[in-house]
Image: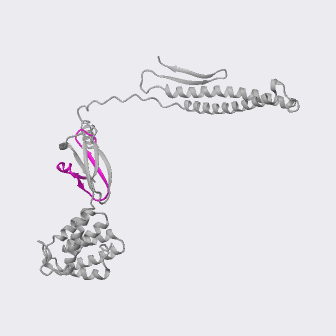
């Protein structure tokens, strides 16, 4: 933009003209020679930074220079830097200030040009600044507390659109007896209508009330009884290690049983195909292959049934150990305990009835 990058050859000349007229300063002490020299240096350095792409650094220099002399040219440069950084509200405010700085008796042309550019900037920025409109439901207006980016909004101004810079903003709304509701909204430049955000307050203690309640409870520790609270629900004992072990073994056994069941089905299909009516074709199978096929049939069938039963027992024992584990501090407790002896294996129900 040409407005953001004036010709470098004019920078020094305009900077000198900034401070040439003391009568242009409104109702403030005339800047000293040190002020004028410092502002001149800051203005030149700021323009160098801006032309190099460091707009944020340039803005700091322009702000310092404008604070020293309050001249139209320093204000215009500051407004342009704010505009480039997306700070449209601050840019318009500074441009408006430039337009209304008192005229000096012998004001240089640079000041006059800066005033004209600032006036055009005010009108141009006015249509680019977006607005936010809050619609809060659930609580009376005189109870609502709203903040945007941490800044409170007066209750009287809540029903009206609020001018904000483009970009992301955080809205926080609460009221006594209601939870704090937060929203994030992103505003774009030049949005014609205000961006409307509807917030419905939910009954419940706000963050501030919870903090106050916490302080009150802490104060009762030294004396007096705190208000009654709901009794905590009973907790159960940790899941025993044997339950996890039984479950793992059961799952492995089920998987093995499934594998042998598939092998048994394959062997059975082979027998039905090669030995219809239980009579094998001697041209395909000799005695040894017939015995091997028969052994495979029986082995797969037996292992699939056995592993399936073991798997179901292990998984069942694990579920019982998890679901029926005793309650901590309860009067009744019941659990399943696995047993393994040389003559018997299984689980035993143990408990108090």
Q: Residue at x 23, y 82 (%)?
A: 16
Q: Left or right: 102 with respect to 221?
A: left
Name the image colouring: one colour
The answer to if 157 sits in the magenta stretch is: yes
Percent from the top left, x then y, of residue 127?
26, 62
Residue 233 appears left or right of 244: left
Which quadrant is the N terminus positioned in?
A: bottom left
Instruction: Report x, y in % for residue 325.
Output: 49, 26
Residue 95 painted magenta: no
Q: Is residue 321 left or right of residue 311?
A: left
Say if 284 sits above or below 52 in the image.
above
Camera-side residue of 353 and 108: 108
Q: Quadrant of residue 285?
A: top right
Span colored in magenta? 151-179
The x, y position of residue 264, in whole percent, is 73, 30
Between 76 and 306, the one lying in front of the other is 76
Of all residues, the one furthest to the top in this rendering is 353
The residue located at (66%, 20%) in the rendering is: 343
Q: Residue at x 31, y 63 (%)?
A: 86
Tell me how many marks there are: 0
Residue at image position (31%, 48%) is: 183
Q: In the orientation shown, which residue stands out farthest toward the front?
A: 192
Of residue 158 and residue 57, the one placed in the foreground of this image is 158
Image side of residue 269 versus residue 127, left or right: right
Q: Tell me where residue 235 appears, x and y as whole percent.
A: 42, 29
């Amino acid at each position: 933009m040409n407005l953001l990058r004036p010709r470098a050859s004019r920078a020094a000349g305009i900077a000198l003209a900034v401070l040439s007229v003391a009568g242009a300063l409104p109702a403030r002490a005339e800047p000293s020679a040190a002020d004028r020299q410092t502002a001149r240096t800051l203005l030149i350095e700021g323009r160098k930074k801006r032309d190099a792409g460091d707009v944020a650094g340039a803005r700091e220099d322009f702000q310092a220079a404008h604070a020293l002399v309050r001249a139209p040219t320093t204000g215009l440069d500051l407004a342009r830097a704010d505009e480039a950084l997306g700070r449209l509200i601050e840019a318009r405010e500074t441009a408006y200030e430039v337009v209304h700085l008192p005229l000096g008796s012998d004001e240089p042309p640079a000041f006059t040009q800066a005033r004209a550019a600032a006036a055009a900037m005010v009108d141009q920025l006015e249509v680019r600044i977006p607005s936010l409109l809050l619609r809060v439901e659930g609580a009376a207006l005189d109870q609502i507390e709203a903040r945007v980016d941490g800044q409170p909004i007066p209750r009287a101004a809540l029903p009206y659109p609020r001018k904000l810079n483009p970009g992301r903003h955080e809205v926080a709304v609460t009221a006594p007896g209601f939870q704090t509701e937060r929203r994030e909204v992103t505003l774009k430049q030049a949005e014609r209508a205000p961006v409307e955000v509807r917030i419905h307050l939910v009954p419940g203690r706000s963050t501030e009330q919870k903090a106050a309640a916490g302080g009150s409870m802490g104060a009762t520790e030294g004396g007096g009884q705190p208000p009654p609270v709901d009794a905590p629900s009973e907790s159960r004992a940790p899941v025993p290690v044997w339950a996890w072990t039984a479950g793992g073994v059961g799952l492995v056994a089920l998987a093995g049983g499934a594998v042998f069941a598939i092998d048994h089905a394959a062997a059975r299909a082979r027998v039905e195909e090669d030995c219809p009516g239980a009579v094998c074709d001697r041209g395909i199978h000799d005695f040894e292959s017939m015995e091997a096929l028969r052994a495979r049939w029986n082995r797969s069938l037996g292992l699939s049934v056995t592993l399936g039963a073991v798997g179901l027992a292990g998984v069942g024992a694990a579920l019982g150990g998890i679901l029926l584990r005793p309650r901590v501090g309860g009067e009744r407790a019941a659990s399943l305990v696995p047993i393994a002896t040389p003559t018997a294996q299984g689980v035993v129900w143990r408990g108090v009835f």
